[in-house]
Amino acid sequence: MPLSLGALPGIGSARVAALEKAGIADSRALIERLPVKYQDSTVLTPLDALRVGEEAAFAGVIASIRSYGYGKMTRVHVVIENDMGDGGTRVSLIWFGAAWLLKQLCVGQPLLLYGTLSRAPNGSRSVVHPSILERRALLPIYPAIDGVPAKPLRNAIAAALDKEADVESGVPTSLIPESIRMKRRDALREAHFPKSKESLNCALKFLSFETLLLYAAALHNRSQPVHIEPLSIPSGTTETFWGAQPFEPTGAQRRVAEEIIADMRGDSPMSRLVEGDVGCGKTALAFMALYAAAVSGGQAALMVPTEVLAAQHARTAQRMLEPLGVSVGLLTGSVSAKERRSVLAAIKDGTLQAVIGTHALFSKDVEFGNLVLCVTDEQHRFGVRQRAALSQKTLHPHTLVMSATPIPRTLAMLLYGDLKRSVVDEMPPGRIPVETRLVPESKRAGLYGFIRSQTVEGRQTYIVCPHATQTEDADCASAEWLAQSLREDGGSLHGLRVGVAHGSQPMKLRAETLAAFHAGNLDVLVATTVIEVGVDAPNASVIVIENPERFGLAQLHQLRGRVGRGGVKSWCFLMGERNARLDALISTRDGFEIARKDLAMRGPGDLLGVRQHGLPEADAIARGADESLMEMARAAADEAFAAGGETLQTLMETAEKRFGDMRGLLT
């Protein structure tokens, strides 16, 4: 049995609660939560050799310490010089909201650091929020968990690795290529505390292959296709739908619409993935499918990841579908008890033909009268079981999943099995491309001036930060800190209406803030990636992304798609220094090309979102997996199913232990 979290050193009741809130229930789950990256301080870069925009480990001696402000708004400014103490090369270190550092630092103290150099307007060199390291190593960096600082988290993981007995996966050794074969305990230890880059690479390849193989096997084990009664969808349904809309569909929309209708008229349940770039018109295709289900005499459900997006889709659906005679309803977790009872009754008796909502749609008390179609928007935000929970509201419904994150074919085949794919590879005419620019720290003041000028013209701005709140472990400014510093007296955007939104806020407050921005009652919204999907503000013409090196290319492309929706010139400003990844984003607006580059540069974890909800396999898939490894995993699963016998039985038992019984689930 796995150890309880409370049995691990440094993990008291408060930290146990914080870990459980993050989905970590015991020592085994803690071990399986792999780092998102590593800080390499095995090689130190001299102060005079630090390059602007590049992460590096470096060392120096504190020459001076100053602080500005007070409390949470304290800014600590430290100057370090080389250990010769000759006043030669100097670098400034800046921490925001870090008053606690003043008790730990003193002049003459040597520091081992890790961070990214930037250049100030006056030409001086500085590193904002560098990490202070204890020793030179490949240091694991984990997803931030509120209430559990990085150091005690690492100590707890080390103890769990020593004490946890059940870490072997049970994957038959014969299915693992000799070139990456190793003991799982050794692989996990190397993944958390690597001895070298070479040993880390071997461990990550092993863990990635293992997870990909088990997932492929679990999907392999789904039930065989079933036969159903075809839906009676009248001829000319798509023409009727498009003819009622205030826009002309693209050729790609027409093609994909016919593919969907052909599936829904078939004698087996549709299982189709629709991929398309930001703004290509996937939502209209989803509504077309809802319309087709309604005219066939059935009901359809559209599930989305956030309440804000659900409400927006419901309003749009009412405009597009109700004139065609289709009744539209909304069901989310925040509706009043009275309204919920009314909606549930209308769903059960079939009065509502199209129902749009969040995960509330698969609550136990939701009963459909005649559900024939389940649509999932932004599918990567849901796990297999969450999508299946909606599909299981009826027997063998048609299933349509939508994704604005293009997935390379090899990865799609492995993650989604035999799901049919449609690609919306054409953009509507008239959409003005978003201009993407890199902005170095030295130009920040000018950027804020530009934001003010856009506000005068009646436009709005997003500012995206990697973190929600400031903590001792944070190595960059948080959304809360930046919003406060911008709107306070003397702040760069003082006088503007600046709001803040992030996932750590109460859901109601976050929803109210997003709604205020959508309604034009805020000039600037400082946020985390909660705006990546579900926020459609046509009046927003600027998005600023802080620390863009912390996001995958596909995610940056998604964020860029939040602007340019209102038919006016729009800009995406990346606050950082030039590098190959950001150059790739600037050089193309093609989401599929960006996805391919993301896969090649950083692996599929960044493409899919390492910490996405409902995908426990993502941590391992994120590391060491390239297309050749994915092909190897799928081939190994095919080999096991072809051979049968004890090897297959062992593989399937292990896959079910890891992912549960996926038989009968539609992906």
Image (tube, rainbow, N blue to C red):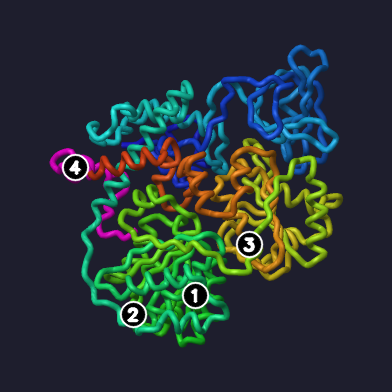
For disc 1, the marked residue is 330
Identify residue type, mark 1. Answer: Leu
Numbered-mark total = 4
Report the residue at 42% width, 77% height from top.
344
* 48 vs 475: above or below: above
**Mark nearer the viewer, 4 or 3:** 4
* CA–CA distance in space, label 4 to label 1: 45 Å
Instruction: Identify which residue, 397 or 101, lies in the foreground.
Output: 397
* CA–CA distance in space, label 3 to label 2: 34 Å
Report the residue at 29% width, 36% height from top.
169
Q: Quadrant of residue 472?
A: top right
For disc 2, the marked residue is 369
Classify mark 2: residues with Cα within 10 Å, few (<14), some (14-19) or many (20+).
some
* 296 vs 335: above or below: below
Any magenta on residue 642?
yes
* CA–CA distance in space, label 2 to label 1: 16 Å
Circle 4 sits in a helix, a strand or a loop, which is it?
helix
Residue 101 position within the rendered picture, expressed as x and y whole percent measured from the top left: 72, 31
* CA–CA distance in space, label 4 to label 2: 41 Å
> Which sits earlier in the primary sequence, circle 2 or circle 1?
1
Circle 2 sits in a helix, a strand or a loop, which is it?
loop
Read off the magenta span: 639-667
Where residue 509 is drawn, which disc sits there?
A: 3
* CA–CA distance in space, label 4 to label 3: 50 Å
> Which sits earlier in the primary sequence, circle 4 or circle 2?
2
Circle 3 sits in a helix, a strand or a loop, which is it?
helix
> Which sits earlier in the primary sequence, circle 3 or circle 1?
1
Identify residue type, mark 4. Answer: Leu
For disc 4, the marked residue is 648
